């Protein structure tokens, strides 16, 4: 009897099933431990990669996640990422900033500038001390990328942490959400600039993609006005959204992603801009979450985590100096984000306890950091080892937020299903 041979499509389907099951199990375990679900899903992706499965059963990992299978998982993961960025854009609401723009802007400015500066300096230190972590020699895009990775905050994760702890209606929660919204826009803009610079190789070459993306944003705001009016009318009248309107909504996000990719920035920015162009309607956002949760949050994003996990190899940090470098990355990330946010909050008159809570909230990275790191790895501006250090930093900075908030008296009420 000949041994059974599993075809490549069947192997890919099996890999998808394994990824989903592991992501849900570890994600549920993270929620039971009082952590955001995204922590467990990222850890699940790491467990399926060379860090654990590759050590315990290298043959199984090589078969289950062979190169052709990885390419299919990568495509599905990118689809999930684009739709997720669309949701992030929809979730950003300018009403959050009403009456808080001056204070939130000051806090965000220092909370971005300090970690950005420290990240650039860290890149220069690593370039001299651990040159294997920095591809090329003296690359400005690597330094700017590392600075951006240090400066960014995970708006979706922060929003769900605030919701779980009933802080959205309290001053500290409203201020944190406002600052995170500004931080999100600034962070993605910085990343767009770094991507454009990295792909073009010069400051002059980065200008056309950035100007093209800005022009595309203006075009979207003008061209989607009829769509926005239609969506608002339907939701105000409690009318169901037809299949044609749903198709327009989701295909528009994909087409916008294609446009920004062709412009030389990245597909995720197009989806984000399409989400920003949608009406600021809570019911619309709730409807989108209900429609996309099962497919995006439960199926496609775990595949993105799995691809990230396959690129995360804890075994590559096989020397004490590399672990020291990982600790330095974490120290710079926490020090820059927390200190910048806390110091400006205190200088602006925010009470000590609220300033501390604000600093730890803005230090949350989560899925957003993973997106940034994957973009850097895809561009070749960071090494696999530095990618692994960044993933560890994202996990730790997100995991530490909840316990630190509880110590400050902002306790968790209950888990929120589907939280990121």
Image (cartoon, rainbow, N blue to C red):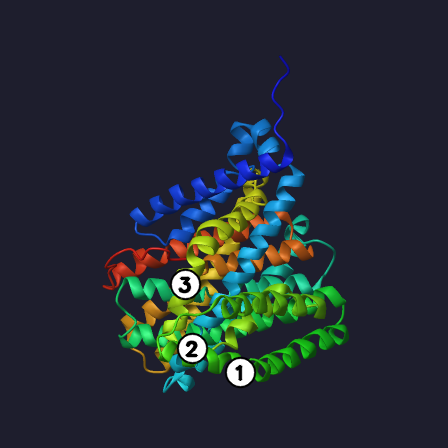
Depth check, mark 3 against mark 2: the one in front is 3
The foreground one among 190 and 336 is 190
Image position, residue 387 (x, y; %): 58, 51
Q: Tell me the quadrant of the picture where the N terminus can be found.
A: top right
Q: Can you say which quadrant of the picture contains the C terminus?
A: bottom left
Tell which tag, 1 or 3, sits nearer the viewer.
1
Left or right of 339 in this view: 79: right
**Where residue 325 appears, x then y in whole percent?**
55, 50
Pointer 3 residue: 289
Task: Residue 136: tell me if it is visible.
Answer: yes
- Percent from the top left, x then y, of residue 36? 37, 54
Viewed as shown, does residue 164 lie left or right of 218? left
Please state the horizontal and vertical placement of residue 160, each as a whole percent of the image.
35, 63
Which one is in front in this view, the residue at disc 1 or the one at disc 2? 1
> At x 74% / y 57%, what residue is drawn?
137
Query: How far is mark 1 from mark 2, CA to CA?
Result: 20 Å
Residue situated in front as seen by the camera: 236 or 272: 236
Residue at the disc numbered 2: 93
In the figure, 277 relative to 77: above or below? below
Query: Which residue is nearer to you in this view: 216 or 315?
Result: 216
Residue 226 image label: 1
Mark 1 vs 3: CB contact within 8 A: no
Crowding around mark 1 (Cα neighbors within 10 Å: few <14, some 14 to 19, many 20+) is few
Cα distance, mark 3 to mark 2?
15 Å
Element carrying mark 3? helix
> Alpha-carbon neighbours of circle 3 within 10 Å: few (<14), some, or many (≥20)?
some
| Tags 3 and 2 touching, CB below 8 Å | no
């Amino acid at each position: 009897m000949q041994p059974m041979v599993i075809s490549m499509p069947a192997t890919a389907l099996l890999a998808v099933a394994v990824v989903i099951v592991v992501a849900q199990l570890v994600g549920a375990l993270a929620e039971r431990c009082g952590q955001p679900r995204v922590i467990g899903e990222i850890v699940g992706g790491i467990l399926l990669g060379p860090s654990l499965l590759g050590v315990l059963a290298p043959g199984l990992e090589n078969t289950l996640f062979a190169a052709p299978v990885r390419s299919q998982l990568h495509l599905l993961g990118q689809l999930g990422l684009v739709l997720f960025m669309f949701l992030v854009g929809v979730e950003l609401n300018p009403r959050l900033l009403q009456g808080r723009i001056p204070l939130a802007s000051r806090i965000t400015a220092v909370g971005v500038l300090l970690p950005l500066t420290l990240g650039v300096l860290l890149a220069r230190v690593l370039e001299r001390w651990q040159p294997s972590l920095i591809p090329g020699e003296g690359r400005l895009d690597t330094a700017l990328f590392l600075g951006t990775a240090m400066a960014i905050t995970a708006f979706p994760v922060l929003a769900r942490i605030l919701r779980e702890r009933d802080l959205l209606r309290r001053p500290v929660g409203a201020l944190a959400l406002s600052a995170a919204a500004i931080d999100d826009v600034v962070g993605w803009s910085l990343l767009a600039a770094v991507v454009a610079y990295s792909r073009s190789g010069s400051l002059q070459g980065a200008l056309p993609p950035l100007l093209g993306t800005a022009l595309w944003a203006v075009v979207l705001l003008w061209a989607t006005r009829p769509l926005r009016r239609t969506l608002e009318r339907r939701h105000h009248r409690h009318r169901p959204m037809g299949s044609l309107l749903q198709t327009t909504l989701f295909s528009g996000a994909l087409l916008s992603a294609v446009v920004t990719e062709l412009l030389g920035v990245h597909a995720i920015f197009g989806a984000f801009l399409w989400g920003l162009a949608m009406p600021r309607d809570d019911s619309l956002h709730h409807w989108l979450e209900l429609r996309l949760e099962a497919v995006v949050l439960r199926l496609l994003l775990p595949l993105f985590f799995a691809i990230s996990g396959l690129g995360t190899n804890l075994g590559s940090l096989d020397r004490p100096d590399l672990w020291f470098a990982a600790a330095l990355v974490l120290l710079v990330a926490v020090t820059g984000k927390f200190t910048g946010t806390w110091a400006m909050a205190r200088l602006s008159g925010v009470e000590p306890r609220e300033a501390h809570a604000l600093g730890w909230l803005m230090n949350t990275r989560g899925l957003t950091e993973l997106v940034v790191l994957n973009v850097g790895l895809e561009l070749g501006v960071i090494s696999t080892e530095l990618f692994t250090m960044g993933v560890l930093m994202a996990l730790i900075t997100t995991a530490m937020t909840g316990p630190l908030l509880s110590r400050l008296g902002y306790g968790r009420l209950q888990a929120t299903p589907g939280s990121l």
